[in-house]
Image (tube, grey):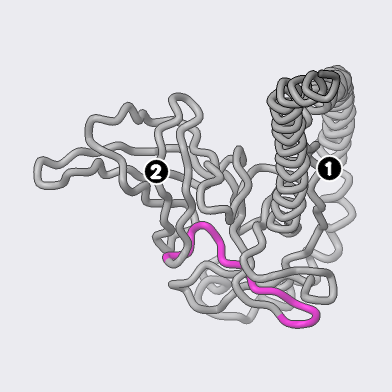
Amino acid sequence: MAIDMRSRALNDFRYYIESSLYPLMIFADSPRSVSKFVSSQFKSRSELIEENERLSAENFLQRADIMHMQALEAENEALRKLLNSPSSKAPRRQVAEVIDVDSNPYLRRVIINRGSKSGVYEGMPVISGNGLVGQVYSLNYGFSRVLLVSDPNCSVPVLSSRNNIRAITTGTGVHDELSVNNVPRSADIKVGDLLVTSGLGGVYPSGYPVAIVTSVGFSDAQPFANIKARPVVDTDTMRYVLLYWYQSVDNENNDSMIMAKQRSDSKHILRQEKIKNLIESLSRSPSLDKKNNKKEQ
């Protein structure tokens, strides 16, 4: 052992000894390997059964929610027709893949494989299954660059889902931290509050989760509270995003609202003309009666 520790003279001898004893080591370790394999198989099977049951329950609940949503949509459509209000169309969405990340450590931007040939435009909102990701800030024919909500140049109008307090989130350059601005110290903001898009400004659709409040601080020297939040979307691990055609939908809704207003205005004008004609006919009838009486005399 002393020779083996102080020199490499026995390296070859140890190599041949270990090689010759390798089958014996495998045989001696076989009970542990077999038990480990069997336990992993049973564990994976039980996990699959549990996951299958959980997904089946979620699928059942989602189907019930879909049926309820269909009933609400039908009721909404009937009410809109009753009020002569334009119906809102479902927004167009398209899946895109994240293919690259900006190398600047102080910027939070990614590149996706959709460009102008797919109808992407600057300022388009980008979402995911969890919430808001950011917006497109530049594009070419085949690719687009997305400004993430955690970028220092990105600001999102939000409101608290608990009490509808409005604020603005701004990126800090850190992937898991946002700064919540313009919130008075007297505002009822608590740790754990969910911040969603407010829809103000017309850039982002309303109601999409943005961040969760992680800390709330106050300072006598500052008129606003010092609030930090964590984005609901982990932009460092996401691979796919959804492009949201928001401005086109708004334009269609605005056009339909303008058309509805024109129709209602035309009906109002027509009603006014009818009333005017009726008044004129009533005002003329006495004079006609007098003329007829004179002719008869």
Asked whether the viewer can see residue 50, the reply is no
Above or below, 80 against 154 in this view is: above
Q: Is residue 151 magenta?
A: yes
Q: Which residues are magenta?
A: 140-152
In this rendered view, identify the residue nearer to me: 184 or 295: 295
Residue on which disc 1 sits: 28
In this rendered view, identify the residue nearer to me: 147 or 164: 164
Main secondary structure of the magenta stretch: loop
Q: Is residue 67 magenta?
A: no
Which image quarter holds the C terminus?
Answer: top right
Where in the figure is residue 86, as x and y percent of width and height?
78, 38
**Which residue does the image show at 60% across and 38% down from the upper left?**
207
**Which residue does the image show at 45% across and 57% down from the upper left?**
155
- Marks 1 and 2 sit apart, C-alpha to C-alpha, by 66 Å
Residue 228: image quadrant is top left
Residue on which disc 2 sits: 167
In this rendered view, identify the residue nearer to me: 277 or 287: 287
Tag 2's secondary structure? strand
**Which residue does the image show at 67% across and 52% down from the upper left?**
127
- Which-is-in-front pick, marks 1 and 2? 2
Question: Callout 1, which amino acid?
Answer: Ala
Where in the figure is residue 110, as x and y percent of width and height?
63, 70
**Which residue does the image show at 66% across and 42% down from the upper left?**
130
